[in-house]
Amino acid sequence: MIAITCGELPMRLKSTALAVAAALLSSMAAHAADIEAWAKPVDAKVLEWRRDFHEFPELGNREFRTSKRVAEHLRSLGLEVTTGVAHTGVIAILKGAKPGKRIALRADMDALPVTENSGLPFQSKQTAEFRGEKVGVMHACGHDSHTAILMGVAEAMARHKSDIAGEVLFIFQPAEEGPPDGETGGADQMLAEGIFKTFKPEAVFGLHVFSTLNAGQLGYRSGPLMAASDRFNIVVKGRQTHGSRPWGGVDPIVAAAEIVSSAQSIVSRRQNLTKQPVVLSFGAIKGGIRYNIIPDSVELIGTIRTFDDEMRAQVFKDLANVAEHVAAAHGATVVSKIPDTIGNPVTVNDPTLTAKVLPSLRKVAGKDVVEMTLTTGAEDFAYYAKEVPGFFFFVGATPKGQDPNTAPSNHSPQFFLDESALPLGTRALLQISLDYLAGAP
């Protein structure tokens, strides 16, 4: 037995603590170096993949070319690959050299019915049919970069799987923006087809490039992050008549215009906005074909964004009430679907998981990791996060020096991605994944 005097004990404890701290810092520095060594060899490929997907975008449930290229790449890495999940989805499983934790990483693949006006040399010239109309197709939300980043992460991990303890499920998901009318799709469809039944992860991670952050920044929030999203459809039915004698029919255009106007008071005058934010927006008004013909009907479609279930239900009720009674005041009727489809729930970052992975983000971006306010955009990543603890974060897309508040937003024809977001996103997702699998603090 070795005797330790009272004076020696604090010094020995201090010495031990310093040694532990030094070892931890050394381990963190080595791990940071490993991330760079893992990520750098795939950077050029991620850039090439992103530009290719950007030039040849595909709408939801129609990601045939994209999913084929993703599947071919994953197979080339020797992963267990399954295609045709939720129509065009692809999943793959990587098994590390040692047993350990299970995680899932998700990227979305679909584009939007937007005609691109970015001026990029690889600008999309693709077209498709959407709601019966010929439209341009564009990766106006950045899903091309999400797909490319996850392909890069998969390759980096496959190259070093002998250093990985645990298993990783890579999810390449179609139709995040919603499936075509009359079809199913997206995250809830992938889950319904059992991807978490055959492989149940302990945690799921995802990212999104975001115009409201500058390149070099990573954004996060613990708890509720993104809003629940619901779509509505209101058809105002009148009676056709000639434009020269409106008294001969019932004008659905005037009734529809007043519905749009009156609906603005639902949020501003009927919701307690000190509790949670609410958004109600009309996205399209369609009716009529000729300047002097008052049509039979007008269609209104739009979106509702909420963070509270009671407030969500009340907006549904109030909008239906406004539509019915305003139309009636004009002698018209309405057929309303509020909501039109099953919407996305609130995207919630598990607080315990957020606290665990926040140091990983800071290893990659340091002081450029910023806490976000509530975001009224929506994400069907929320479905995965309802099944297992989830963490979803943002990667800045707007070039440094440009005000992100005035930059073209996600979904804009001018949406522009600073491509430095690609290596940053790759490293952030790798760092989170490897730290979690290794059990790092």
Image: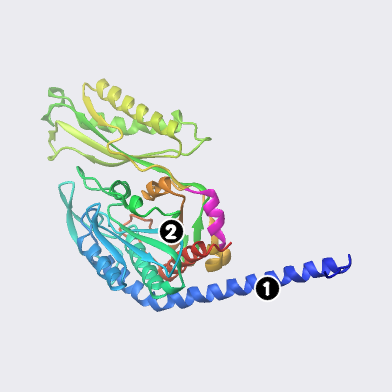
Q: Is residue 353 magenta?
A: yes
The residue that label 1 is drawn on is: 22
User: Is the residue marked by circle 2 packed among few (<14), some (14-19), or many (20+) residues within 10 Å?
Assistant: many
Toward which corner of the image does residue 310 lie, by quadrant? top left
Secondary structure beneath label 2: strand
Up the image or down, 132 lies above or below 327; here it is below
User: Most prominent secondary structure in the magenta stretch?
Assistant: helix
In this picture, which residue range is highlighted in magenta? 349-359
Q: Residue 102: which disc? A: 2
Q: How many marks?
A: 2
Query: Looking at the picture, how far across and down is residue 410, in whole percent?
Result: 37, 56
Q: Which dot, 2 or 1, sits closer to the camera?
A: 2
User: Is the residue marked by circle 1 packed among few (<14), some (14-19), or many (20+) residues within 10 Å?
Assistant: few
Up the image or down, 240 lies above or below 20; here it is above
Q: In this view of the protein, which residue sits in the foreground, 392 or 47?
A: 392
Q: Is residue 434 magenta?
A: no
Measured Cα–Cα span from mark 2 to mark 1: 30 Å
Up the image or down, 236 lies above or below 169; here it is above
Q: Amino acid at mark 2?
A: Arg
Is mark 2 in CB contact (under 8 Å) with mark 1? no
Q: In this view of the protein, which residue sits in the foreground, 420 or 41?
A: 41
Toward which corner of the image does residue 174 lie, by quadrant? bottom left
